[in-house]
Image (cartoon, grey):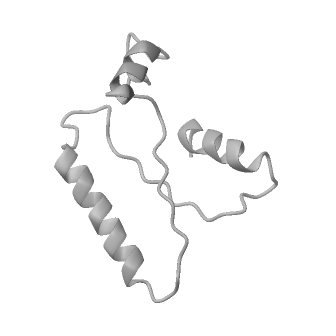
Amino acid sequence: MDHGLTVPLSLMFGQPSRWPVKVIPLAVNVLLFPPPTGNRCYALGEAIARAVHSYPEDLNVQIWGTGGMSHQLGGARVGFINQEFDREFWAK
């Protein structure tokens, strides 16, 4: 698990000795080519929904998306975040 999961969990629950929820991290490639298409990501969401709905018990399942649109994890621009672009993108 990396900061993309532990930071949101810490914001929600503080710093407990154990997380009070069960977590299944699911990383979607955004660094290496070929990146997944929007349609492929949508199909993944549909498959997850079918799996959750097929479970015999009533579940409380949440999907958290973390990261920034311009967050650079590696390369020459490591650590760079273009906040202006991110805000403009989400405003549209």
Observer able to see residue 77: yes
Res 33 → quadrant: top left
* 84 shown above or below 45: above
* 82 shown above or below 35: above
Q: Nearer the viewer, residue 41 or 2?
A: 41
Observer able to see residue 72: no
Q: What residue sits 18% from the left and 43% below the top?
A: 37
Q: What residue sits 79% from the left and 46% below the top?
A: 15
* 70 shown above or below 40: above
Q: Nearer the viewer, residue 17 or 45?
A: 45
Left or right: 39, with 92 as reference point: left
Q: Position of residue 56 (x, y in %)?
A: 46, 89
Specify the quadrant that holds the C terminus.
top left
In the orientation shown, which residue stands out farthest toward the front? 92
Q: What residue sits 81% from the left and 52% below the top?
A: 16
Numbered-mark total: 0
Left or right: 55, with 57 as reference point: left
Q: What residue sits 43% from the left and 53% below the top?
A: 26
In the orientation shown, which residue stands out farthest toward the bottom? 56
Q: Nearer the viewer, residue 19 or 68?
A: 68
Q: Position of residue 53 (x, y in %)?
A: 39, 79
